[in-house]
Image (cartoon, rainbow, N blue to C red):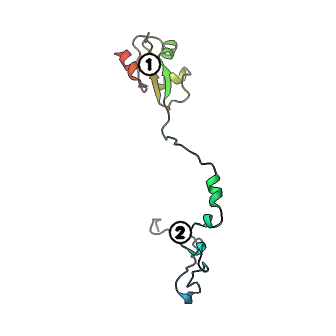
Amino acid sequence: MAIELSTIKKSKGALKKRKIVGRGNSSGHGTYSTKGLKGQRARKGVSNLKRLGMKKQLLQIPKVRGFKSLYPKNVAISIATINENFKDNDKVNPQTLLEKGLIKDVKAPVKILGKDSLTLKGLEFSGVKMSESVKNLLK
């Protein structure tokens, strides 16, 4: 017999039936449905934490604020750093930047920034982002 979604069953004892309340007086849990008489605890929509006096404690706990992006930040490399570490007609890509110790991880996005002048000739850029000012230098 093949295992399919329609044939999977829970193991014995894994499923426990919940107590059914509020189904008439003959059930033994009718009328007030095990909540007692009146009051805040008998009403619907009151959380257990509130009625146990924990709401004040919950409000006092410091919350983690802000937002953390799923995408990694660009590793910034300046034109001056490129001038110092590369020669004419070199290839500039994440692998060569890693070999020269300018970045720590090949998978991290790399962006070349700077308004300095590029002194090297014939550099071949691949797999890196560039700022507008750097793109204008290469034209």
Quarter holding the C terminus? Answer: top left
The answer to whether 11 is drawn above or below residue 117 in the figure is below
Left or right? Give the position of 139 relative to 27: left
x and y percent of residue 9 in the render? 51, 70
Left or right? Give the position of 30 relative to 93: right
Residue hosting label 2: 45
The residue shown at (44%, 18%) is 91
Near-viewer residue (95 or 72): 72
Secondary element at image label 2: loop
The residue shown at (50%, 25%) is 76
Left or right? Give the position of 39 relative to 80: right
Q: How many marks?
A: 2
Is residue 12 at all visible to an observer of this figure? no
The residue shown at (59%, 70%) is 14
- The residue lying furthest to the bottom in this view is 26
Near-viewer residue (109 or 91): 109
The answer to whether 127 is drawn above or below residue 40 in the figure is above
Secondary element at image label 1: strand
Instruction: Check disc 2: other Cα within 10 Å, few if <14, some if 14-19, many if 20+.
Output: few
The disc placed on residue 32 is none
Of marks 1 and 2, the one in the foreground: 2
Near-viewer residue (91 or 129): 129
Near-viewer residue (11 or 131): 131
The answer to whether 81 is drawn above or below residue 30 in the figure is above
Is residue 1 at all visible to an observer of this figure? yes
x and y percent of residue 108 in the render? 50, 32
Q: Earlier in the sequence, mark 1 or mark 2?
A: 2
Residue hosting label 1: 91
Type of the residue with mark 1: Lys
The answer for how far apart the CA atoms under marks 1 and 2 are is 65 Å
